[in-house]
Image (cartoon, grey):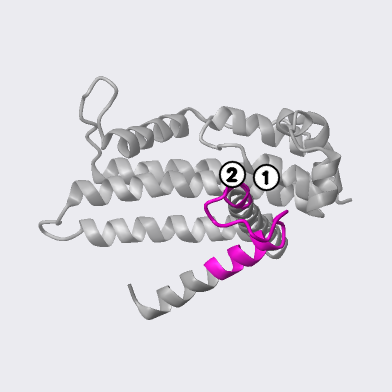
Amino acid sequence: MSSIKEVLFGEQEKQAEKWVRERLTDQNLTVESEEWQSLLNDYSAYQDYLNDEYEWISEIKWLKENGSVDIYQNFVTELTNIKKLAENSLSEPIPLNENLIIKMCYSYSVTLLEAFLGDSIKALISENKVYLNNAIERLEQIRNTKYSLFDLSKSGMDLSGLAIKCVSEVLFHKIDKTMEMYEKVLGCKINIDTSKVKLIIDIRHDIVHRNGYTKENEVIDILPHNLYQAITDIKHLVNKLQKIIANQKLKDYK
């Protein structure tokens, strides 16, 4: 272990011991005592809480600095970069690890989609009180939240922060459920055919969890043109959704 790591661990141990000693009922108790160990567990849980709060504050700050338009532009840029990376890698006379490159690019394209869908809906909630109120009234993830008023006051979050925190716990791989969430937040109908993207997400699930095999243990054969078509279909869906968002914003900001 390097000397720097030793110093860091030593400082962490000192901080933990100081925190525990300040709360001991008897200063003669040692580290082997039940009370010491219990307080040490409390200290560890408290540190985890502080880390979570720091990450949460950082996310709220990022959402405020990167609105829904910027999030969309970043998504388009990253998706374009994936396609360029694939095209450059697969254009060699004899591409090395062709199958691996395709699976990685295919999977990451869906990861970008899910990140975009999650970040965009949170940005909308943070940007506009109409969307915040819609989210609070219509999203069961918020209506059925486990956070109490005490949690709200303790963390210093406002209603927007609490709503975003609830939405952050949602997984955005179920595309139809995600579209329903957007409809409820935006307050408008979203008529987008999601069938192609649903299939892409299913294939990505097989890649990530079964290394490209179906539940029936059949190999999924993904060729370069399948990858490029998947990227096109993902971009097409996002473009349609972004257009609906932009149009709805124009109505709601008037």
Tag of residue 121:
1
The amino acid marked with disc number 1 is Ile
Which residue occupies the extreme left position in the image? 94
Across and down, in percent, residue 118 comes to 60, 45
Residue assigned mark 2 = 117
Q: Is residue 250 visible?
A: no
Secondary structure at badge 2 equals: helix
Considering only vertical position in the picture, is 120 above or below 170?
below
Cβ atoms under marks 2 and 1 closer than 8 Å = yes
Instruction: Note whether residue 113 is visible.
Output: yes
Closer to the camera in the image, 165 or 172: 165
Outermost residue, top direction? 216
Q: Is residue 18 magenta?
A: yes
- What residue is rendered at 54% in x and 56% in y? 31
Residue 45 magenta: no
> As shown in the figure, which amino acid type bears the numbered disc 2?
Leu
- In the image, taking residue 191 as reference, residue 218 lies left or right, namely left
Q: Position of residue 128 (x, y in %)?
A: 82, 50
Q: What is the span of residues highlighted in magenta in the rendered image? A: 13-39
* Residue at 46% from the left image edge and 77% from the top image edge: 7
**Percent of width and height locating residue 137:** 83, 31
